[in-house]
Image: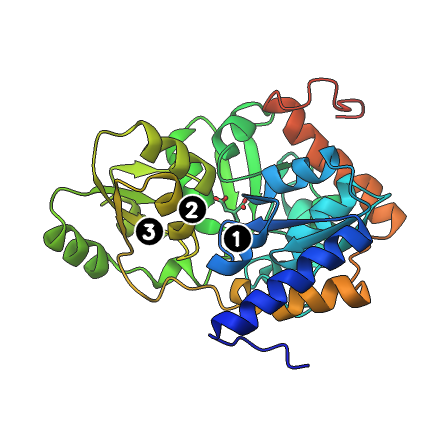
Amino acid sequence: MVYTEKNDIKYNDALKKKIAKLKTKRNACIIAHNYQRDEIQEIADISGDSLALSQAAVRTDADVIVFCGVQFMAESASILNPDKIVLLPVKEAGCPLADMITPEKLRARKEAYPEAAVVCYVNSSAEVKAESDIACTSSNAIEVVKSLPQRQVIFVPDRHLGRYVQLKVPEKEMILWEGFCPTHIRVQEEDMIKAKSIYPNADVIAHPECKPEVLSLADHICSTGGMFKYVKQSHSKEFIIATESGMLYKLQKENPDKKFYLPTPRLVCANMKLITLGWVAHSLEMLVYEIKVSDDVRERAKVTLERMLAVTGEKKEAALAGY
Ligand code: CIZ
């Protein structure tokens, strides 16, 4: 069998049937990130952002979770669900942003700023989470940073999200890591200006991983989850969406009367697109590739994630002990 992409309807239908059978056999649940291919979001039991997916993974009765996303997301699901089998269908599906920091380099930064709290964006490895005080997503980063007693905050690894948070929380001193998302930084100021001139009535929504000059041209800045909420309540009929292309699938599905445009066709994350129907079938058939985090790292990274959940009220009883 060939596991590469094939734009053949019959072939895809056969794969979908095979996946459905294997899902029952394995008592599995398929979860897909908002940036996945359309056909993967279509077959998923749940789609959403990385945090929503990890939380959904906690609630499911399935024994096997097929996580259609990238490595750090499957790791978070495994950290929160140590008793379930968490599979990443393509083991090379990594996140270049998460790879821009190592635990060793973070330890050196902590030594340079011993008074600072360490906030890690969820787009980081389990080891980096284990070295951090608290995690955040793009939807709760401002709330998380505001909640900290420390004035100094080491924020890793996305410098654009960190800079955006600094603007919103001026009372903190943010020490930014130099990381960035290679997909989001492809949107240029010129792309936004051009898109706005072609669609003058469109509302412009941008993800905070975009560059500051791009964010300054947006009407609204938010996470992928925030984009769904914003579009639903907006009276606008057209939207320019500055984030990864996969978002357009569910935005269009949930809002059939509205139109969505990307400011540039370059907004494609090659890692997210590695997962195809063939690889999902392969993953369920062979039970690969299992994502496991060592006990020591998992325990510490779990505390970092649970502190975030406690701040955002998503899990009030979360362990704040030792915070
Ligand atoms: O947390 C996520 O899933 C990411 C990477 C982005 C977002 O805004 O949802």
Would you say 174 lies left or right of 206 here? right
Would you say 249 lies left or right of 2 here? left
- Of circles 2 and 3, the one toward us is 2
**Residue sitting nearer the eye, 108 or 308:** 308
Q: Residue at x 77, y 47 (%)?
A: 78
Whether 56 is drawn above or below 18: the answer is: above
Q: Check the image and tell me how it is coloured.
A: rainbow
**Residue sitting nearer the eye, 226 or 163:** 226
Q: CA distance from mark 2 to mark 3?
A: 15 Å
**Residue sitting nearer the eye, 27 or 176:** 27
Q: Residue at x 64, y 81 (%)?
A: 2
Determine whether the residue tagged by mark 2 lies in a helix, strand or loop.
helix
Determine whether the residue tagged by mark 3 lies in a helix, strand or loop.
strand
Q: Residue at x 75, y 59 (%)?
A: 22
Check if mark 2's residue and mark 1's residue have beta carbons within 8 Å: yes
Q: Which residue is mark 2?
A: 250
Q: Which residue is mark 1?
A: 41
Name the spot of residue 222 as percent of width and height, x first: 39, 38
Which comes sooner in the sequence, label 2 or label 3? 3
Q: Amino acid at mark 1?
A: Gln
Would you say 303 lies left or right of 67 here? right
Q: Which residue is mark 3?
A: 242
